[in-house]
Image: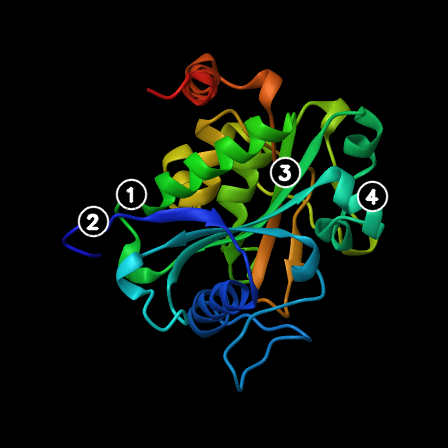
Amino acid sequence: MLTDEPHFILRLAEDEADLLAAQRLRYDVFVAELGGDGPLVDHARRLERDEFDEHFDHLLLIDPGRCAARRNHVVGVYRLLPGERAAAIGRFYSEGEYDLGPLRRSGRRLLELGRSCVHPDYRGGTAMYHLWNGLADYVLGRGIEVLFGVASFHGTDIGALRMPLAYLHHFHLAPEELRVRVLADHFQTMDLVPREEVDRRAALVATPALIKAYLRLGGYVGEGAFVDRAFNTTDVFLLMDTARMSEKHRGYYTRRQGQKREPAG
């Protein structure tokens, strides 16, 4: 972790240099660090990419001190796909793993999130906080009602993940009207330990920080996990309904909205 917190710049990607820097960071995290792979991953150039990149907005966290060459200036990234853009291209990214019928039928304004990562040197500070602030502004500016996306546990050993998966299933399953489900051909149940035998402490210790952050904000999970052997992950579906947020976090969004509306000077 950096000893001195930099003054970050937070903005959407503007050009190819920005996108390439984001893809390089994703390669370092998802491929080099976590062992993932994919059909469009460019190992020679160290770029983690896929066919959806051109359709998403890329929210970037930039350290100005690394901007000189505009090669490694991106130290955090979030990939964002508003519902209307997904309609134009025919699908959301996560529909390769989950049946999103309940969300599509809801008539709500949707936003898909993905490929969230932070450079190792910037973890443990405020980097993720800044990304979440940028996400909040994006959501407010577009009137988003439901945020969702796939989040991952590292590895594909379901036995080793049975406690956190069971915890999510028993205590954080989405309301039925919004409960998406893994595609039938890939369905992996998360009901792996009886509710009364779930060790919550052990489950939370084994749960990635990003998933825990969504749960603290009132997030839910879909039904079933998707074992992604190519990416060396076990995926769960996370969603957050802004109408069901905890009062504490809804207040945070409201305050940010009020701040944005105040006149300058």
Estimate the x, y position of residue 121 in percent, counting from the top left: 27, 61
Identify the residue at horizontal 64%, vertical 62% (top origin).
Answer: 228
Real-space Cα distance between discs 1 and 4?
A: 34 Å
Quarter that holds the N terminus: bottom left
Q: Secondary structure at mark 1?
A: loop
**Residue identified by numbered label 2:** 5
Q: Secondary structure at mark 2?
A: loop
Residue at image x 54%, y 64%? 19
Classify mark 4: helix, strand or loop. Answer: helix
The CA span between labels 2 and 4 is 40 Å
Q: What colour scheme governs how the chains and residues are painted in the rendered image of this protein?
A: rainbow
Foreground disc of the pair 4, 3: 4
Residue assigned mark 3: 148
Place residue 210 in its image quadrant. Answer: top left
Measured from the top left, where is residue 56 in percent x and y? 65, 52
* Label annotation for residue 66: none
Determine which residue is flagged by label 4. Answer: 87
Which amino acid, by three-letter code, is at mark 3? Phe
